[in-house]
Image (cartoon, helix red, strand yellow):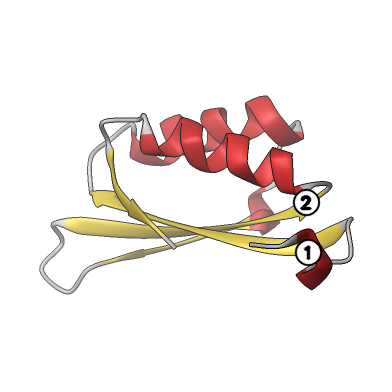
Amino acid sequence: MNDDVFNFPCDYPIKIFGKDQPDFVSTVCNIIELHVGKLHKNQITSKVSSKGSYISLTVRIIATSRSQLDAINKSLQNCPMVAYLL
């Protein structure tokens, strides 16, 4: 990513995938909230895979800087519940 591509602040979707387990949504949201403040339910959408093993979350945030996005991605990558990010 290059800052020139984004005009901060901007609407930014974060897609997170992981095993569907009871604390996945709250864990991921807590990690993101450390960087952006309290999330509202309308910022979060989820979809369970057809076999029910995985869940994908899309969390829309107002990104304020490239360093903020880098920090969120690093925190999520360090979470063992997260399989991958888009």
Q: List x then y, in percent, for residue 47.
A: 37, 66
Residue 65 is left or right of residue 74, and the answer is right
Q: State the residue position of label 1.
A: 11
Q: Which labelled disc corresponds to residue 22?
A: none
The residues bearing labels 1 and 2 have C-alpha atoms spaced at a distance of: 6 Å
Determine if residue 71 is in view: yes
Could you tell me which residue is drawn at 65 percent across and 31 percent down? 33
Q: Nearer the viewer, residue 73 or 26?
A: 73
Q: Are marks 1 and 2 in contact (CB under 8 Å)?
A: yes
Circle 1 SS class: strand
| Label 2 neighbour load within 10 Å: few <14, some 14-19, many 20+ | some
Vertical placement of residue 81 versus 18, above or below: above
Q: Which labelled disc corresponds to residue 63?
A: 2
Residue 36 is left or right of residue 27, and the answer is right
Residue 16 is left or right of residue 5, and the answer is left
Could you tell me which residue is drawn at 77 percent across and 71 percent down? 5
**Sequence-wise, which precedes: disc 1 or disc 2?**
1
Q: List x then y, in percent, for residue 65.
A: 80, 46
Circle 2 SS class: strand
Determine if residue 26 is in view: no
Quarter holding residue 54: bottom left
Vertical placement of residue 86 versus 76, above or below: below
| Amino acid under disc 2 | Ala
| Label 1 neighbour load within 10 Å: few <14, some 14-19, many 20+ | few
Quarter holding residue 11: bottom right
Q: List x then y, in percent, for residue 53.
A: 13, 57
| Amino acid under disc 1 | Asp
Could you tell me which residue is drawn at 17 percent across and 74 percent down? 50
